[in-house]
Amino acid sequence: MMSARPRRTGEPLGMSEDVHSRGLIDQLHFSPDTGHIRLLEQRMLLMHAESFAALRHELITLLGIDKARELITRLGYQQGFEDGHRVRDAGIGQGIEGLNLGPRLREIEGFVRNQPNETMRYDIEQGEFFGDYHWRASWEAEAHLRHHGVSGSPACWMMVGYADGFCTAYTGMPIHWQETECVAMGHAQCRVIGKPLAEWPREEAGHAHFLQIDTFVDSLAGARHRHGDRVQDLEGFVGASAGFNNVARLVRKVAPTDSTVLFKGESGVGKECFARALHSISPRSGGPMISINCAAIPKELVEAELFGVERGAFTGADVTRPGRFERAAGGTLFLDEVASLSLSAQGKVLRAIQEREFERVGGTEVRKADVRIVAAANQDLWAEVEAGRFRRDLFFRLNVFPIEIPPLKERREDIPLLTALFLERSMARCRKQVRGLSTSAYNALWNYDWPGNVRELENMIERGVILAEDDGVIDVQHLFAGGEKLQDGAFNLGPGGRLVPEQSEHLPSSAEEAIVDQLLDEGVSFEQIESLVLSRALQRSGGNVSATARLLDLKRGQVEYRLKRRHDELI
C-alpha cells in the first residue's frame, strides 16, 4: 500500500515489502509533474479497470471470442516478455527469486493475487520447470463474469499470456501456463499450472496455440490435413514477436488473392518460409510451389531454367525439358534473390509476368504462364533501380504487395521458441540427446547481433548439439565455436574447449594489479570493495543515481538495488 506521508516527484512508491519484492519497489516511480509512471525503467499507465473491461467486452463482440482471446493473450505475452528481460537486466533477483518477481509484478499492477500451492521448481540445465498457483481476486475473471456470465472455458487470457512471456524470457525456454480452474467458469478461485511448452500435448496447450508452429492463420490446420508431409516445409515457422505477427497478418491478408508478393529482408530471416506459408493458405495450395534461387544460376542458363528448353536448342540440350514457369503451372513460382537476375533475364521475366505467356528456348510454341509470382530480395530493389542494375518496370510489377520481414535482432522474443524448435530438430538429425542450454548460453543467444538471422540460429543450435556431451548441456563455447563475435568482443576456443576472450581484450595494468594486491593483502572483502567503489562513484556524481550508473557501466536499476541493499543492512 502507499505510504501515508506526501511523496516528492519521482520518489519510489512505498509498499509493504517481502523478500521477493524488495528490489521491485525501488523500481516504481510516480512523476505527476512530468506525466510519467515508471516501472523497471519503462513507462506505465494507470488505467481504469472498468474501462479496460469494457474494451475487452467490445473486442469479444467485434472479433468473436477465439480471436479476442488470441489477441489479448498475445498482448499479455508481450508485456510479460518485456518484464522478464528487464528483471534479468536489473539484476534484482536470481533463479527462483527472480522468477517470483513475475507474480509480484502483476500484484503490484493490480491484476491478481498469487498464492503458490507448492514451491516453484526451476533447473534450466535439466530443462525442468514446474509451477502451481491459485489466482485470487483475478480482475480478468471478474470482468468476464460480469460482462458475459458464466464461461465454458477459462477467461484469464492476459494473465496466462503474461505468465508465459515472463517465464519464457527469464528462463530462455518456452514456458506455458494453463488455467485449470477459473472464477469465470464458476470455480471458487482460479488455478494455473506451468510447465515447459514441449511437455504439454498439443491438444492441451490451450491458449498457447499462438506460440505453436505455423498456426498464425486459421486455415493452416486445414492445409496440414490436405497436404500432409508437405507441411513439414513450414517447420521452423514460429514466433510471438510483434514483428513476426505483423508479417503474418500481411500474409493472411494477401493469401486469398492472386497478387504478386515481394518479400524483403536480410539474408536468413525466413523469406522462403513465409513464401511457403503464403502458398499453403492460398487458393493455389493444391498446385505445386516451385522455387528458384536466381543467384545460383549461371547467366547463360537462366532463360533455360526459367522457361525450359527444346531439344537441340543449343549444344548440350539433348532432351526437351520444362522450365520453372511451366512446372509451377496452377501453383506458385518463388523467385529468390531476384535482384541477381541479369538485365536480359529481367526483361524476359517481365514479359512472362506481364503477358502471362512465354516460349521455351529454341521453341516457337507460346505457352500460358498460369502461376502466381512471389519474389524475395535481400537488397534494396529501389536503390538497384536508381543504380541502373534493376529494371524499373519489373520493380513495379513485383512491388504490388511488399512485405518487410524484420531481422532476428529486432524480434528477439522469437529466439526461445526458435531455439526449442531447432534443438528438437537437431537432436533428431544428429541422433543425439542433450538436456538443453545453460543459462549463460541463453544469455549469449539473447545478446548476440545475429547477422545471419534465423538460419544462423538454426546452424548454431545444431553445432551445439554436436559439440555437447551426450545427455549433457549446451554451453556458450559449444554455440560460438565458429568465430562469431559476442557483444563483449571476439571469443576463441581455448584449452579444454572453453570459450575465452581474444588477447586484444583489456588486461589489468601493473598499477591496477598493485591496487588489487594491496586490497587482498589487507583482507578487504568483496562486499567492502563494492561498497567503497559505489560510495566513491556517488560522491563523484554528486549523488545522482543515473550518473553513478553510467560511471560504473551499470543500469540504473542495478545501482538502486545495491543502494537499497546497503540501506537494509544498516537498519
Image (cartoon, grey):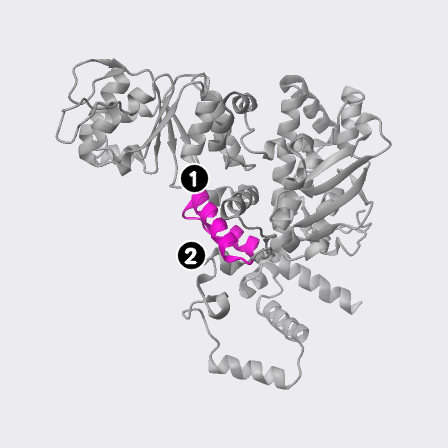
Provide the residue designation for mark 2: 484
x then y, percent, for residue 402 = 39, 27
Of callouts 1 and 2, which one flags the residue occurring earlier in the amino acid sequence?
A: 1
Instruction: Determine whether, in the image, residue 541 is placed left or right of residue 569.
Output: left
Is there any visible trace of residue 4 in the rendered image? yes
Residue at 77%, 51% (x, y): give it: 14
Give coordinates of residue 196: x percent, y percent: 66, 43
Give the side of residue 255 with respect to residue 552, left or right.
left
Residue type at the position of mark 2:
Glu
- Give the amino acid at mark 1: Val
Q: Secondary structure at mark 2?
A: loop
The Cα atoms of the two marked residues, 1 and 2, are separated by 18 Å
Q: Which residues are magenta?
A: 441-469
As drawn, is 26 to the left or to the right of 513? right
Q: Residues within 10 Å of mark 2 (few under 14, many from 20)?
A: some
Q: What percent of the width, then of the height, locates residue 222?
A: 55, 21
Give the image location of residue 328, x and y in percent. 34, 21
User: In the picture, which quadrant includes the C terminus?
Assistant: bottom right
Residue corresponding to mark 1: 269
Helix, strand or loop for disc 1: loop
Position of 451 relative to 76 (above/below): below
What residue occupies the far right of the structure in this picture?
188
Q: Are marks 1 and 2 in contact (CB under 8 Å)?
A: no
**Nearest to the observer: residue 417 or residue 367:** 367
